Image: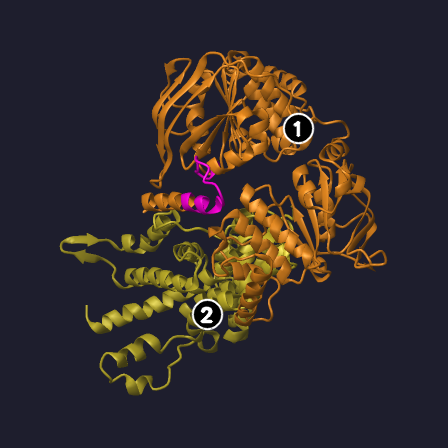
Chain colours: A yellow, B orange
């Protein structure tokens, strides 16, 4: 494998890791506040559809992004209502949201576009296009560092940079601000937050809203950045992979970045190398395609160390003494 | 003094939950700079009243005056603003936060943490010096002892400028030494002019530290008196509504045959620390052997091994027959068959299945009894009938076998466990912490049952961290320290001071100040555990 191929694989790793990363951070905010969210998948799917649909109808990818975020946040609102206000079961609410999104997106797509449950392909201003960072061309001649800058760092859509910027931002919010302290506290011991005179419900809704926002960006990136339009079930389990990455990362932002890059790398390798020849033994492409999912199962089954979730996660808060 | 406004005054507070009147027309006045005790049995409405004061519940009627001013307390924020701080029985701390983070939570200075943290660090240092409240500000709460966690709760309240401090059953989880320290802190706070409300069901604490005391019974305030002008007996009568025997009447023991013999019992836990280091003892029919000791010195492990859910090495003989201490023959079932009944230390965890009904709980462990079978099915009607009888005989209230175990008060839960074990007529009864979290009326009953069993010629092994309880029930006392028995004493020929020293690992009276000797033995114990752990 030459250097350029390596760069290309890494480049595609970054692209593929982006939606995972956004969804993973979305889950991080929600679960750190004590609301388990299995509905990341559904929210991303909803956002993917609405962003593609609105971008296709208006020709503006920015309006698409807003529509995607709005779609995702509506689902977040439903999840919040079910699990915070009505103290329902968070897993069931999340599963319901996934089903709702899977059905609704295809239904509306068929109704609006009559293309078999997909949106028309997006072109020009309907997509997030690659941004060439300053001096990328000039510096590409510099050995090693030049190509890394030009190929790997430059040339992604704006949402990729947003996603990566979200990692330090999330860390800073969680560990350096009052909001972050309270958010972490409400996922560990809501009764401590409540007796300190801070609203548990308000904090949890805020966390769920941030989750909706980030899932919205993730979904919009899928349909308008990574690909050009919405197709049925295009999230393909990324929401669950993001959840696995979240557990792998033990609910910490920087570790989430590493975990998502790992999953992204596996997907990139599968995409690049169809059948891998390992000294006579050929690993078929299906195995490579399945790798991220296999890793997900392994992680969720708890083989990778002991991950302790936020203590109050999954439990509705009932005031009692 | 007389024209000074009370720090806190309640007028006509009432609160009902459905048909249950938890508080009925309650009025209290507490003067600033005093400690006011509120005493009452479990379920008397003490906690409800304090929850109203802290904005958890809204009173149906009544008014609250803080420093003479009428104050509405719709939520906890309002209570904090009014200068009320609360130390709950179950701490409201974030376990994986540092002490500092817990202290500033909800009382931060601004949107960023850094300035709040450094301000709190300074404030904590000052409070620590002022009130003997020292805690490492950077320690994680989960690494702190219960006593230190409680200090964090007090610090939280003081950091929020609380003038009125409410403590709900603060000593329930503390060792005697920690409780003494807490009372010193409360003394200091009173001297600084803080007002303290102490909720408890322990008469001794009320007598020891309060200035005035209110008694609650069934949602009503039955009396408010000056502590100096009352007695434990009078308070107990006010609490329960009838005369209560605080001392257990018992005839001298008539020990019979050796029912239980233990030789050189040893147990090493999964982290490699030796928990039992060669325990040997005999237990005879018709006697109560009390095992005293500070929690965590191997008493729990001893009970678990004897009860059949811990494995150990050594020899244990029941009625002269050796029983297995590991392997398939070492089960609770086998122990019961051998004639050992067991009332576990933690009734919520080991004694009962809380969501299950009382009748189900009343047969667990004995559910294979042929009387409870009907072919391949359980004979639920028979079990229910049996449970009903047990509940009547043990005065479980309410006597409704269909209620889930969690709906009973602590005392009544304990009575269910006790009824189950005693009525199966064991030769040997193991009892751990029989009256932990149990109200005074039920304590009297439970103690009487234990003595009745002894008089029937049963052998009773009692483990309790309450020295009073050990003294009033035991015929002989063994003191455990660091996995060993420091010695046996005849209950009639020892005193609290001697046992207290033995509980700290000292068998010879050192004379003079014993604190240095105590520190030395405790340090040796910790060093041993750390070495084995590593």
Q: Quadrant of residue B471?
A: top right
Q: Residues within 10 Å of mark 1 (few under 14, many from 20)?
A: many
Name the chain letter of the residue that bears numbered label 1: B
Residue B504 shown left or right of residue B49 in the figure: left
- Give the residue number, with chain letter if any, for mark 1: B442
Q: Is residue A100 above or below residue A140?
A: above
Return the mark for residue B301.
none
Residue B353 visible? The answer is yes
Cβ atoms at labels 2 and 1 below 8 Å apart: no
Q: x and y percent of residue B268 in the render?
A: 35, 35
B68 drawn magenta? no
The residue closer to the viewer here, B143 or A181, is: B143
The residue closer to the viewer here, B15 or B271, is: B271
Residue at the image position 38 percent from the left and 14 percent from the top: B321
Magenta extent: B503-521
- Give the residue number, with chain letter if any, for mark 2: A166
Compute the Cα span from label 2 to label 1: 59 Å
Residue at the image position 23 percent from the left and 78 percent from the top: A144
Q: Is residue A302 above or below residue B259?
A: below
Residue A234 shown left or right of residue B389 in the figure: left
């Amino acid at each position: 494998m030459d250097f350029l191929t390596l760069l290309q694989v890494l480049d595609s790793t970054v692209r593929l890791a982006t939606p995972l990363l956004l969804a993973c951070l979305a889950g991080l905010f929600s679960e750190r506040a004590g609301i388990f969210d299995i509905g990341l998948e559904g929210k991303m799917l909803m956002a993917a559809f609405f962003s593609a649909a609105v971008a296709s109808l208006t020709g503006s990818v920015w309006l698409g992004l807003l529509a995607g975020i709005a779609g995702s946040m509506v689902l977040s609102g439903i999840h919040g209502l079910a699990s915070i206000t009505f103290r329902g079961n968070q897993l069931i609410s999340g599963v319901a949201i996934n089903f709702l999104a899977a059905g609704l997106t295809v239904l509306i797509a068929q109704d609006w576009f009559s293309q078999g449950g997909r949106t028309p392909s997006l072109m020009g201003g309907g997509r997030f296009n690659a941004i060439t960072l300053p001096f990328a061309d000039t510096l590409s001649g510099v050995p090693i560092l030049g190509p890394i800058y030009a190929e790997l760092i430059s040339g992604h859509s704006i949402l990729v940079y947003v996603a990566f910027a979200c990692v330090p931002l999330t860390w800073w919010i969680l560990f350096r601000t009052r909001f972050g302290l309270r958010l972490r506290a409400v996922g560990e011991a809501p009764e401590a937050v409540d007796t300190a005179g801070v609203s548990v419900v308000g904090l949890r809704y805020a966390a769920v809203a941030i989750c909706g926002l980030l899932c919205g960006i993730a979904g919009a990136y899928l349909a308008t950045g990574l690909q050009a339009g919405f197709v049925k079930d295009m999230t393909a389990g990324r929401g669950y992979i993001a959840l696995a990455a979240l557990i792998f990362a033990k609910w910490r932002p920087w570790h989430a970045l590493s975990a998502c890059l790992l999953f992204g790398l596996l997907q990139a390798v599968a995409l690049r190398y169809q059948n891998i020849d390992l000294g006579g033994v050929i690993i078929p492409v299906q195995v490579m395609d399945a790798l991220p999912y296999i890793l997900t199962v392994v992680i969720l089954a708890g083989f990778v160390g002991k991950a302790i979730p936020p203590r109050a996660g999954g439990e509705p808060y009932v005031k009692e003494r | 003094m007389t024209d000074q406004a009370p720090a806190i005054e309640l007028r006509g507070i009432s609160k009902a939950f459905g048909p249950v009147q938890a508080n009925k027309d309650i009025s209290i006045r507490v003067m600033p700079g005093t400690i006011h005790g509120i005493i009452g049995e479990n379920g008397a409405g003490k906690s409800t009243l304090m929850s109203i004061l802290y904005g958890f519940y809204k009173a149906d009627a009544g008014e609250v005056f803080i420093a003479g001013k009428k104050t509405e307390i719709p939520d906890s924020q309002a209570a904090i603003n009014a200068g009320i701080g609360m130390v709950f029985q179950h701490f409201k701390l974030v376990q994986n936060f540092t002490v500092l983070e817990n202290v500033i939570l909800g009382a931060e200075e601004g949107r960023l943490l850094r300035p709040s943290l450094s301000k709190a660090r300074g404030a904590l240092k000052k409070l620590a010096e002022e009130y003997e409240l020292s805690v490492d500000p950077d320690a994680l709460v989960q690494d702190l002892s219960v006593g230190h966690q409680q200090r964090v709760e007090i610090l939280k309240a003081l950091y929020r400028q609380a003038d009125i401090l409410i403590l709900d059953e603060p000593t329930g989880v503390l060792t005697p030494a920690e409780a003494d320290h807490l009372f010193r802190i409360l003394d200091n706070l009173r001297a600084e002019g803080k007002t303290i409300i102490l909720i408890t069901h322990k008469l001794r604490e009320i007598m020891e530290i309060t200035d005035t005391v209110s008694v609650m019974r069934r949602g009503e305030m039955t009396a408010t008196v000056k502590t100096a002008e009352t007695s434990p007996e009078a308070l107990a009568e006010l609490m329960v509504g009838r005369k209560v025997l605080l001392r257990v009447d018992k005839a001298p023991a008539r020990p019979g045959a050796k029912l239980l013999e233990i030789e050189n019992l040893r147990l090493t836990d999964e982290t490699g620390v030796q928990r039992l280091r060669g325990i040997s003892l005999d237990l005879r029919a018709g006697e109560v052997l009390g095992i005293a000791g500070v929690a965590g010195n191997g008493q729990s492990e001893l009970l678990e091994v004897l009860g059949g859910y811990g494995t150990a090495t050594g020899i244990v003989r029941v009625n002269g027959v050796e029983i297995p201490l590991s392997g398939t023959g070492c089960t609770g079932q086998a122990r019961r068959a051998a004639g050992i009944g067991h009332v576990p230390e933690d009734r919520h965890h080991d004694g009962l299945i809380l969501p299950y009904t009382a009748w189900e709980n009343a047969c667990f462990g004995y559910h294979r009894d042929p009387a409870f079978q009907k072919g391949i099915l359980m004979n639920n009607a028979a079990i229910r009938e049996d449970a009903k009888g047990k509940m009547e005989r043990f005065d479980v209230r309410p006597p409704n076998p269909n209620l889930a175990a969690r709906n009973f008060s602590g005392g009544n839960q304990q009575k269910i466990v006790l009824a189950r074990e005693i009525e199966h007529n064991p030769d040997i009864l193991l009892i751990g912490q029989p009256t932990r979290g149990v109200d005074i009326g039920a304590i009297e009953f439970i103690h009487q049952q234990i003595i009745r069993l002894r008089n029937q010629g049963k052998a009773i092994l009692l483990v309790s961290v309450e020295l009073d309880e050990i003294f009033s029930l035991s015929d002989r006392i063994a003191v455990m320290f660091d996995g060993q028995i420091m010695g046996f004493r005849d209950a009639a020929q020892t005193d609290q001071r001697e046992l207290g020293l033995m509980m700290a690992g000292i068998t010879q009276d050192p004379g003079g100040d014993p604190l240095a000797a105590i520190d030395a033995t405790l340090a040796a114990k910790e060093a041993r555990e750390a070495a084995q752990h590593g």
